[in-house]
Image (cartoon, rainbow, N blue to C red):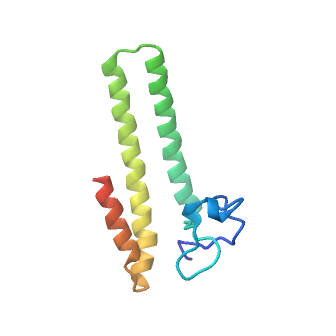
Amino acid sequence: MSDVNKIPEGSCPHCSPAPAEAPCCAPAEGSTGCGCRHKQRTEEEYKHLITRLNRIEGQIRGIRSMVEKDVYCTDILVQAAAARSALNGFTRELIDQHLSTCVAEDLKNGGEEKLQEFLWILNKLV
């Protein structure tokens, strides 16, 4: 299964109504149609990521509520640290998925584009 799928022109939510208005969807070099990259995740991968995001979303809402209720600063900071830790967990999960699928498949097929892309984004994360 390919980790990056070409979406038929006109069916990509980022391209509608007109591809020219969405630079992220510019046609890939040497191809026509949508240039968007998409990752087909397994149901398990999807569930893990969404569960983590739901937890983070709840934590952020809780922090907002604490600010609105004038809760003491350090109490809010403790919750902010927990939310940051949860976001780091999400990031680690996504990195693991990316390395074990996208990067591994690209290397197996003799490519290094995904590895270089990963090294670039890793530099942004640290």
Q: Is the N terminus in the top left, top right, bottom left or bottom right quadrant?
A: bottom right
Q: In this view, does 97 lie above or below 125?
A: below
The number of callouts visible is 0
Location of residue 21 in the rendering, given as x and y in whole percent from the top left corner: 63, 59
Q: Is residue 29 above or below residue 101?
A: below
Location of residue 110 in the rendering, given as x and y in whole percent from the top left corner: 40, 86
Location of residue 69 in the rendering, given as x and y in whole percent from the top left corner: 46, 14
In the image: residue 26, left or right of residue 94? right
Q: Which quadrant of the structure image shows residue 66?
A: top left
Q: Which quadrant of the structure image shows residue 109?
A: bottom left
Location of residue 20 in the rendering, given as x and y in whole percent from the top left corner: 63, 64
Return the residue found at the far front: 20
User: Could you tell me which residue is drawn at 43 percent across and 65 percent down?
Assistant: 98
In the image: residue 76, left or right of residue 62? left
Q: Is residue 84 above or below residue 109?
A: above
User: Could you tell me which residue is drawn at 57 percent across and 68 percent down?
Assistant: 26
- In the image, 56 versus 35, the foreground residue is 35
Question: Can residue 41 be spotted in the picture?
Answer: no
In the image: residue 41, left or right of residue 121? right
Question: Can residue 74 be spotted in the picture?
Answer: yes
Q: Which quadrant of the structure image shows residue 77?
A: top left
